[in-house]
Image (cartoon, rainbow, N blue to C red):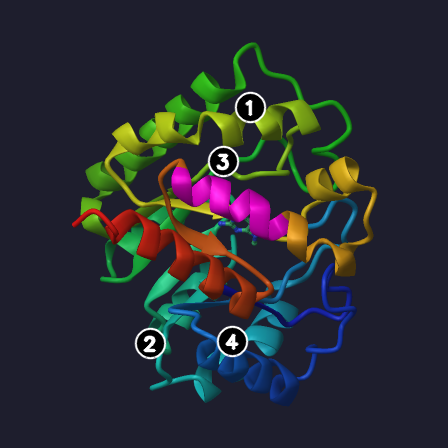
């Protein structure tokens, strides 16, 4: 899953893809590099990022969605706003990536009345303050149980189980130790019966471990992503698609070498 942030304050691209043309060009390049899914987002969720109105988010995301219609990848929209979900689904996207796990009023029903896929992510708190004092008695069990509950709720609403992906939400209300524990025990989530999506790309946990700035975290991202795949993740949300695609080819070759 290649990341396309259409935000002026995007944490990883410094706003360079904030115009529709740049975002579309970037998305097509990521598809060329091997992305099977393009995740388009119009709201920055980095700690302390400013709120974005529904209209601002629609203005950023929808022209990119329209331009990517018919492209060679699944188009996903990263949003927690029901109004944006509804508009994106009407425009033909195939997936909604929701860091709020469809907890906004009306969000579940919108997805239930569609046939698109959805990623339900765990987070503790809200982006503006979530990194101030994240606390868990047992991070792995608590995140696991939250995802199990959100999946069951989605199915009760009528969202078919094979449309649901689950994500532990690395960096969303988690300390470095919480993130490391989640990655080490990611295989515990495979019993949830849904593809696990892992978003580790350039995250601050990698900066904390390596001392490197955002734009110098791709080697660390690659290592964490390989670890996630070996622990059972099936969708990897990344900035550097080319590097991740190469790493996946190596994993696949090794895994298939005994067949
Ligand atoms: C939007 N966004 C930023 N980080 C993310 C992550 O780790 N997972 C998902 N599903 N979305 C994310």
Q: Is residue 45 above or below residue 15?
A: above
- Determine which residue is flagged by label 4: 30
Query: Position of 11 compared to 197: left or right?
Result: right
Q: CA distance from mark 4 to mark 1?
A: 30 Å
Q: Would you call the spot at circle 2 few (<14 residues within 10 Å), some (14-19), or many (20 or more)? A: some
Q: Decide which of tag 2 and tag 1 comes sooner along the chain.
A: 2
- Determine which residue is flagged by label 2: 92
- Determine which residue is flagged by label 3: 122
| Residue at 32% in and 28% down | 148
Tell me residue 62's x, y (percent).
Answer: 51, 78
**Mark 3 CB near ligand 1 (8 Å cut):** no
Q: CA distance from mark 3 to mark 1?
A: 15 Å
- Secondary structure beneath dot 4 equals helix
Tell me residue 117's x, y (percent).
Answer: 30, 57
| Quadrant assignment, res 53 | bottom right
Q: CA distance from mark 3 to mark 2?
A: 26 Å
Tell me residue 40's x, y (percent).
Answer: 53, 68
Query: Position of 114 compared to 142: left or right?
Result: left
| Quadrant assignment, res 23 | bottom right
């Amino acid at each position: 899953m290649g990341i396309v942030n259409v935000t002026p304050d995007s944490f990883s691209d410094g706003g360079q893809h904030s115009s529709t043309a740049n975002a579309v060009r970037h998305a097509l390049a990521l598809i060329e590099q091997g992305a099977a899914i393009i995740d388009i987002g119009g709201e920055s969720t980095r700690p302390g990022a400013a709120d974005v109105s529904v209209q601002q988010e629609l203005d950023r995301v929808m022209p990119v969605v329209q331009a990517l219609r018919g492209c060679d990848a699944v188009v996903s929209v990263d949003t927690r706003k029901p109004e944006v979900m509804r508009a994106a689904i009407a425009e033909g996207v195939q997936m909604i990536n929701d860091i709020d796990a469809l907890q906004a009023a009306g969000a579940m029903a919108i997805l239930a009345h569609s046939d698109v896929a959805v990623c339900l992510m765990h987070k503790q708190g809200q982006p503006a303050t979530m990194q101030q004092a994240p606390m868990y008695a047992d991070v792995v069990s608590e995140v696991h149980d939250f995802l199990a509950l959100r999946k069951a709720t989605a199915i009760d609403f009528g969202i078919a189980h094979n449309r649901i992906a689950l994500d532990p939400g690395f960096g969303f209300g988690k300390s470095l130790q919480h993130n490391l524990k989640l990655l080490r025990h990611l295989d515990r989530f495979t019993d949830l019966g849904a593809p696990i999506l892992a978003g580790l790309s350039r995250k601050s946990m990698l900066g904390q471990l390596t001392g490197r700035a955002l734009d110098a975290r791709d080697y660390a991202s690659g290592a964490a992503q390989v670890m996630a795949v070996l622990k059972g993740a099936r969708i990897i949300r990344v900035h550097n698609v080319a590097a991740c695609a190469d790493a996946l080819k190596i994993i696949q070759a090794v895994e298939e070498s005994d067949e």
